[in-house]
Image (cartoon, rainbow, N blue to C red):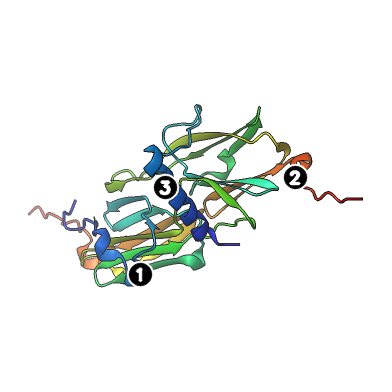
Amino acid sequence: MTEKTQLATKQETDIKSVSRQNEPSIRPAVDIFEDESGITLHADMPGISRDRLSVKVEGDTLTIEGDAEIPVPEGMEPLYADVRATHYQRSFTLSNEMDTDKVEASLNQGVLTLRIPKREEHKPRKIEVKVG
Amino acid sequence: MFGTTALFDELQRIQREMESVFGSTPWANGIRSSSTGFPPVNVGTTAEEVDVYFFAPGVNPDSWDISIQNNVLSVAGERRVIREEGASYYRKERFDGEFRRTFSLPDDIDPEKVDANYKDGVLHVRLQRKESSKPRQITVN
C-alpha cells in the first residue's frame, strides 16, 4: 500500500473558520479505508439532511460540515444531553494523487459516504513480465 | 422549532456549573445501560410529553426494538459496519454491533401513547404523559 495517501487530520485550530470559532462543534466519527482505485470515508452525522451538509475541497484540505436539524416541541426543557452541539465539522488533508474533481458524496440515515478516486496515472498497474 | 443549539447550550452551562460544584455529572447512569455509550442520547420534557432522541446513524431500520415495561424504556438496535476486505484501514472510529440503552421514565407516562420516528439517523421517541397529570385550568364557579 502506498504511504503517501494517508489522510491526516489537521489540528482543530487549523480548520475552524473565523465565524465558527466560538461555537462548539462535533467531530464526527469516521471510518477511512483505501483500496486500489481510491479512498472511501464514512462519517456519522446524525440529524444532517442533504441540504444542510457541505463537503468542500480547498487546496489539499477536505472539509465536511453541517448543522443537525432536530425537531423539538415548543417549550421543551432539556433534562439530559450527551449531544451538546448541532454543528459538525471535520477536515482532512488529501495528497495530490487524489482526484478531488471526482469526489462522490452520498448520505443515508445520517451516514455520509465519500468516495475519492485516485487519478488515473496513480492507479496501480500490473506490469506484464515477458518471458523471452 | 429548531432552537436546539440554544437549548443544549443552556443545558451545557447548567451541567458545567453542576460539575464545578459536585465534581462530576450529577445524573446517575441506568444500572441496565450498556457501557458503549452508543448511541448518544438527549432527553427533554414538556408538560405534555417526554422526548428522547437517539443519535444513531446508519441503523438497520428493521432492527429497532423499542419497549416499555414497568416504566422502563428500552431501546435496542443493530448497526453493522460493512468492512471491505483487502482494503487498508486508516481509521475505524465508528460503532459496529448491537446496542441497548434503557431509561427509567417518570411515573406519569402513558405506555399506550408512545410513538417513534427514525429520520436522518436520529430516532425520536415521544412519550405522552397521562391525561390526569397534564396541567389543567380550573375554573372557579
Q: Are marks 2 and 1 in contact (CB under 8 Å)?
A: no
| Residue found at the very far front of the displayed protein | B141
Q: Are marks 3 and 1 in contact (CB under 8 Å)?
A: no
Between A58 and A105, the residue placed more toward the observer is: A58
Within 10 Å of the Cα at label 3, are there few (<14), some (14-19), or many (20+) other Cα atoms?
few
Circle 1: residue type: Lys
- The numbered mark at residue B17 is 3
Residue B64, located in which quarter of the rendered image? top right
Residue A39, located in which quarter of the rendered image? bottom left
Between B139 and B82, the residue placed more toward the observer is: B139
Q: Mark 1 — on which chain does it sit?
A: A
For the residue labelled by badge 1, is the local secondary structure a helix, a strand or a loop?
Answer: strand
Q: Residue at x 25, y 62 (%)?
A: A13
Q: Mark 3 — on which chain does it sit?
A: B
Q: Nearer the viewer, mark 3 or mark 1?
A: 3
* Marks 2, 3 in one chain: yes
Q: CA distance from mark 2 to mark 1?
A: 48 Å
The residue indicated by pointer 1 is A56
The residue indicated by pointer 2 is B134
Residue B67, located in which quarter of the rendered image? top right
Residue B127, given in percent of the width and then of the height, sits at 67, 43
Q: CA distance from mark 3 to mark 1?
A: 38 Å
Circle 2: residue type: Lys
Residue B65, given in percent of the width and then of the height, sits at 59, 36
